[in-house]
Amino acid sequence: MITIGVTGGVGAGKSEILHYLERQYNCRILLSDDAAKELELPGGAIYGPLVSLLTEWNIPGDNEEPLLFESGEINKKEMARRIFSDAELLRKVNELVHPAVNRYILDEIERERKEGKREFFVLESALLVENGYDKVADSLWFIFCEKSVRAQRLRMTRGYSDEKIRQIMEKQVSDDVFRKFCDVVINNTGPLDAEGGPLEQVDAAIAGLREKFKDRA
């Protein structure tokens, strides 16, 4: 099994590339954000410690809501209000969540490898390098898209204002950093199915990986 890490800025169209990989190839797709959400559900590995931490660190405010819904699930809006109101709480939550997500991802990769049914394991994460996934991925892909196109997509699909888009992009890793660590760059600025476009680039990258790791077939 070949492991691919996929990253890129907001609005770059990573989801389109992932959907294509899922349709076209025998692969398991895992989004790191989805892994975190699963672990935070009742019964999840970090649910209890996270609820205890957020309860202990109750930060009163005008917009305060119940931390838990009747189902027992964490109210993510209230969780966000609390953690972004206190830098120390945010640090403690990250110290709890990130190692658990990393462990979950590594366990899933190992499980899929042992089952031997998949040709590829594709992990999407905005923090591929920061979380050390470059050490477990055979190839890191940077999904690139011009900032103007990304901004247009965010306005149309999410209704973001220009100011919100600017703030988000300023906080994200620069394209130069992505290019430094990633061995494959998929230019997703133009139409997906254009000649030489994103999908052809994906197919070429897959062919290259198959050739490079043909001993695993």
Image (cartoon, rainbow, N blue to C red):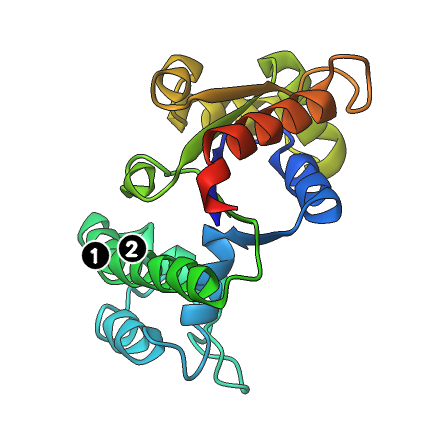
The residue beneath circle 2 is 98
Q: Is residue 143 above or below residue 157?
A: above
Q: Position of residue 143 (x, y in %)?
A: 56, 26
* Res 173 quadrant in image: top left
Residue 94 horizontal/vertical position (percent): 26, 54
Residue at (29, 43) in percent of width and height: 131
Task: Out of 118 and 76, give the one closest to the viewer.
Answer: 118
Residue type at the position of mark 1: Glu
Q: Residue type at mark 2: give it.
A: His
196, 10: nearer the viewer: 196
User: What residue did someone put label 1 on?
Assistant: 95
Q: Is residue 125 visible?
A: no
Give above or below for 39 relative to 105.
Answer: below
Residue 215 image-quadrant placement: top left
Circles 2 and 1, Cβ within 8 Å, touching? The answer is yes
Q: Distance from label 2 to label 1 (Cα)? A: 6 Å
- Report x, y in % for residue 187: 62, 17
**Regarding mark 1 in the picture, which secondary structure is present there?**
helix
